[in-house]
Image (spheres, coloured by chain):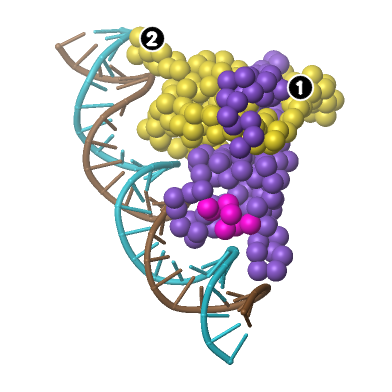
Chain colours: A purple, B yellow, C brown, D cyan
DNA sequence: CGCATATTCAACCAAATGGTTGACCAAACC
DNA sequence: GGTTTGGTCAACCATTTGGTTGAATATGCG
C-alpha cells in the first residue's frame, strides 16, 4: 500500500528532465567540468584547458550540460562564461532519495582528514 | 580553499561506478523498472509485462541495471527474480549532494495528499 | 517423453554519442 | 586594417545504445 503510493510518486516525475540530467551526468568529462565550476565561474577556454581533448569537444559537452540545465552560459565580450546551476540536480537527487536515505558525507570531517593526510595540497 | 578541497573530493569518486549508475538511470524504461521493484521482487516476465517492448529488450535493460549494481538477479527454478539494490545509488546520490542539499520530498505528506486528491487509487 | 513456459543469445538495424578536423565568425589588440 | 584570440559550426568517423526477430537453452508439467 505504502509502496504502491511510492511507485505512483516515482511515476510522476517528468521523465524528460531526468533523462537529460542523468545522461549529462553519465560522462566523466562532464562531471569533472561540473566539479571545476564549483570553484568558480569559468570561460570556455579555461574549462577546456585541463582536458586532453579539442576545444570543440568541450564546447559540445557544455551544450549538453546547458540543455540539461546544469550550467548556464553568458557571453561577455568575446568570452563565454560558464556558471554552475546546481538546482537542476534537485529532481534527480530527490528521485534517487526516494530509494533510500543517502546521507551526504560529512564534508567538514573530510576537509580535516585532508589537512592531516595531504598537507601538500593545503596551499597549492 | 574550501572549494578547492571540494573539487578534490569530487575527483576522488570512482568515475567508473558513477558512469554505469548514471547511464543506467538515464533511461526511462529502466527508471520505471526500478520504481516497480520498490513494491516487490519480480520475475523477468512480470517486469516486462507493462512495457510495449519485447521480452528480449527488457532482458537487456535488466543486464544493464545488474551491471550497474542497481538490481540483483537470482534464478530459482526456471524463473529469475529481480531484486532492487538501492545501495548502488549511494555514491551517485552523495556525489550530487556535494552540489547542494537536496532534501527529499516529505513522503508521508505526499501520501496524505494522495489520499485526499486521488481516493480512487487508494485500493486498486 | 513431449510440450509449454521462462529467459537468453545472436544477428541485425537505425539512431545517438563522443570524438576529430578545418572552416568560419565575432570581439579585441597593435 | 590586419592579426590574434575565443568559440562555434559542419562534415565526418567509430562506437555504443536501444530496439527487433528468430533460434536456442533450461526448467517444469502431464
The answer to whether residue B27 shows anywhere in this view is: no
* D20 or A35: nearer the viewer: A35
* A117 or A41: nearer the viewer: A117
Give the residue pinned by disc 1: B107
Q: Which residues are magenta?
A: A43-49
Q: Position of residue B42 (x, y in %)?
A: 50, 18
Q: Position of residue B115 (x, y in %)?
A: 81, 22
- Identify the mark nearer the N-term, 2 or 1: 2
Which of the labelled discs sits on residue B76, or is there none?
2
**Viewer-nearest of discs 2 and 1:** 1
Residue B20 is a magenta residue: no
Circle 1 packing at 10 Å, graded few (<14), some (14-19), many (20+), is some
Q: Position of residue D11 (x, y in %)?
A: 39, 70
* A14 or D14: nearer the viewer: D14
In the image, is D10 to the left or to the right of B9? left
Q: Residue at x 49, y 33 (%)?
A: B15
**Looking at the picture, does residue B122 appear above or below residue D18?**
above
**Looking at the picture, does residue A11 appear above or below residue A73?**
above
Chain letter for mark 2, please.
B
In the image, is C9 to the left or to the right of A35? left
Chain letter for mark 1, please.
B
Amino acid at each position: 500500500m505504502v509502496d504502491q503510493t511510492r511507485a505512483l510518486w516515482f511515476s510522476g516525475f517528468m521523465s524528460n528532465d531526468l533523462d537529460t540530467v542523468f545522461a549529462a551526468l553519465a560522462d566523466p568529462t562532464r562531471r569533472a567540468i561540473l566539479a571545476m565550476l564549483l570553484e568558480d565561474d569559468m570561460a570556455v577556454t579555461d574549462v577546456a584547458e585541463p582536458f586532453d581533448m579539442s576545444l570543440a569537444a568541450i564546447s559540445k559537452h557544455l551544450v549538453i550540460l546547458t540543455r540539461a540545465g546544469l550550467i548556464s552560459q553568458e557571453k561577455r565580450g568575446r568570452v563565454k562564461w560558464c556558471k554552475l546551476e546546481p538546482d537542476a540536480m534537485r529532481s534527480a537527487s530527490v528521485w534517487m532519495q526516494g530509494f533510500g536515505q543517502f546521507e551526504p558525507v560529512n564534508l567538514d570531517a573530510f576537509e580535516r582528514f585532508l589537512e592531516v593526510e595531504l598537507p601538500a595540497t593545503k596551499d597549492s
